[in-house]
Amino acid sequence: MKKLIIPIVALFAISCQQDKIGYVDNVELMDGYEEKKEIESKFNKKVEELTKKRDSMSQAFQLELQAFQAKAKSLPNKTAQEEYALLQQRGQFVAQQLQQEEQLLQKNSQTEMDTLVNKVKREIKSYGEANGYTYILGGGEGGSVLYGKDGKNLTEALLKILNDKYKN
C-alpha cells in the first residue's frame, strides 16, 4: 500500500504545479526593436530615392512630350503619329521599369521583415525555455492577451535582450 501511495502523491504534486505564463506586447516589442527601426529607415530611404527618380523621369518625359507636341504641328500627320507612338512606347517602358523596381523593393523589405519576425520568435522561445515559462502569449494589436498583470509582461525584458544582442 505504501508503494502505491508515494507515486500517487508524487503525481498529484506534479499535476498541482502551475504553468508559468507570461505575455509580450508584440507592437511595443517590434516598435522598440532597434534592428527593425534600422530596416524601416533603410527601406524608407530607398522609397524616397525611387520616388525622386520617378518624379525626375516623369518631369523629363513631360518636357519631351511638350516639345513633341509643339514640333508635331509642323510634321506630316503620319510622321507625327509614328513619333507619338514611339514616345508612348518609351513612356510605357520607363513606367514598367519603375514598377519592377518598386515591386523588388517591396519584396526585399518583406523578406527582411519576415526574417526579423522569425528572429524575434526564436528569441522569445529561447527566453521562455531559459526562464521556465510554459507559455508566452502575444498581446497588443491582434494579440491574444486581453488582460495581463504587469508582472507577467515580458516585453521590456525581451526588448532589452534583443537590442543588446543587436548592438553586439
Image: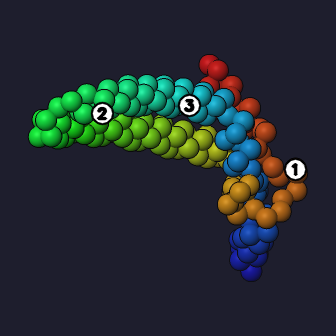
Q: Earlier in the sequence, mark 1 or mark 2?
A: 2
Disc 2 designates what residue?
Answer: 69
Q: Is residue 115 visible?
A: no
Q: Amino acid at mark 2?
A: Gln
The amino acid at mark 3 is: Asn
Q: Quadrant of the N terminus?
A: bottom right
On residue 44, the disc is 3
- In the image, is residue 121 above or below residue 38? below
Which residue is outermost to the right?
Answer: 150
**Image coords of residue 106 (percent x, y):** 44, 41
In the picture of the structure, the residue carrying the numbered disc 1 is: 151
**Mark 3 Cα within 10 Å, few/some/many (few <14, many 20+)?**
few
Residue for point 58% across, 46% down: 121
**Label 1 vs label 2: CA separation?**
71 Å
Gap in angstroms between the C-alphas marked 3 and 2 = 37 Å
Which residue sits furthest left? 78
Q: Amino acid at mark 1?
A: Gly
Confirm or deny contact between disc 3 and disc 1 (CB under 8 A): no
